[in-house]
Amino acid sequence: MRFRTALFAGCLPLSTALCLVFTLPLRAQQLAASGSGTAALRAARVIDGTGSAPITDGVVVVTDGRIVAVGAASRVQIPAGARIVNLGDATLSPGFIDMHAHLIGRALEDKGASE
């Protein structure tokens, strides 16, 4: 709880705090950035973004920078020679995009704003 308080006391935006807490290990990021070869990312849970329940003991197979398979470890065949990255108790999920915007409201130069 102390860590959580420190994050918000320092006025970090929530999205930044979540990125710090839920970022994949650097090794997995470097692997994804290379864009060549095949890697299998194993994690305790995988959220596939379809709205279905999280996949327990999940695997995401990436070949040449593209996701080619997602599912439970018991159902996904990992290609021979693939590099296996065990992420332990991590949860893999699709990327998040901050789509927060205010499209309507009072203009900033509204003369009545100071009254």
Image (cartoon, rainbow, N blue to C red):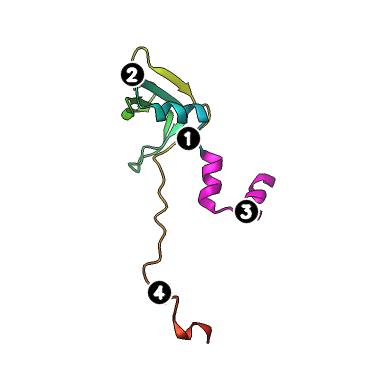
> Alpha carbon of mark 2 to alpha carbon of mark 1: how far?
20 Å
Disc number lying in front (2 or 4):
4
Circles 2 and 4: CB atoms closer than 8 Å: no
Q: Which residue is mark 2?
A: 77
Where residue 18 sits in the image (x, y, percent)? Answer: 53, 46
Disc number lying in front (1 or 4):
4
Q: Nearer the viewer, residue 29 or 85?
A: 29
Q: Residue drawn at (52%, 39%), measured in percent from left and top? A: 22
Q: Which residue is mark 1?
A: 91
Where residue 27 sits in the image (x, y, percent)? Answer: 50, 26
Disc number lying in front (3 or 2):
3
Question: Given the image, on which type of amino acid does mark 4 rest?
Answer: Gly
Where residue 95 sits in the image (x, y, percent)? Answer: 40, 42
Upstream in the sequence, badge 2 or badge 1? 2
> Alpha carbon of mark 1 to alpha carbon of mark 4: how far?
38 Å
> Alpha carbon of mark 3 to alpha carbon of mark 1: how far?
23 Å
Circles 2 and 1: CB atoms closer than 8 Å: no
Q: Nearer the viewer, residue 103 or 55?
A: 103
Circles 3 and 4: CB atoms closer than 8 Å: no
Q: Which residue is mark 4?
A: 105
Q: Residue drawn at (40%, 22%), measured in percent from left and top? A: 40
Upstream in the sequence, badge 2 or badge 4? 2
Where residue 32 sits in the image (x, y, percent)? Answer: 41, 29
> Alpha carbon of mark 2 to alpha carbon of mark 4: how far?
52 Å
Circles 3 and 1: CB atoms closer than 8 Å: no
Please report the bounds of the magenta region as a residue range: 1-22
- Main secondary-structure element of the magenta-colored stretch: helix
Question: Is residue 23 shown in magenta?
Answer: no
Q: Which residue is mark 3?
A: 8
Residue at the limit of the structure toward the top, as seen here: 80
Please tell me whether mark 1 sits on a helix, a strand or a loop: strand
Q: How many marks?
A: 4
